[in-house]
Amino acid sequence: MSEFGSVRIKLDELIRTRGISKNHFCHLAQLQSAQLNSYLDNSVTRLDTAVLCRICMALDCRIEDLLEFIPR
């Protein structure tokens, strides 16, 4: 966590609640499995806005459903 806080990616929860497989989600969002895994385990350091848009379109969600700011 930085001195300002962190951002949590709630992708795993959203995929689970939608009831779709990770493989199917990769296809819908046009992601490689390694890229998906970095978003799932919150190890991605720079968020790609194009990827975030594809994720939101694939899951029919809003960006605030996907990302959570956790203040320090």
Image: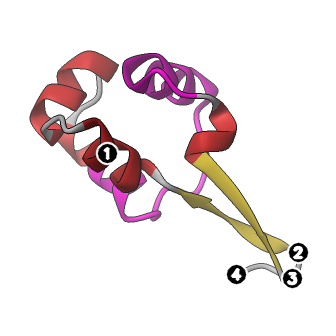
Tag shown at residue 4: 2
Name the residue type under label 2.
Phe
Residue where numbered disc 4 is placed? 1
Pinpoint residue 39: horizontal percent, then vertical percent.
41, 51
Tags 4 and 2 touching, CB below 8 Å:
no
In this rendering, is residue 8 above or below 21? below
In this rendering, is residue 56 above or below 63? above
In this rendering, is residue 56 above or below 37? above
Residue where numbered disc 1 is placed? 17
CA gap, disc 3 to disc 2? 4 Å
Residue where numbered disc 3 is placed? 3
Pinpoint residue 23: horizontal percent, then vertical percent.
11, 34
The residue depicted at 34 percent of the width and 54 percent of the height is 12
Q: Which residues are magenta?
A: 36-61
Label 4 residue SS: loop
Q: Residues within 10 Å of mark 3 (few under 14, many from 20)?
A: few
Name the residue type under label 1.
Thr
Question: Marks 1 and 3: which is nearer the front?
Answer: 1
Say whether residue 7 is magenta. no
Depth order, front residue of 32/29? 29
**Image quadrant containing the N terminus:** bottom right
Name the residue type under label 4.
Met
Question: Marks 2 and 1: which is nearer the front?
Answer: 1
CA gap, disc 1 to disc 4? 27 Å
Tags 3 and 2 touching, CB below 8 Å:
yes
Tag shown at residue 6: none
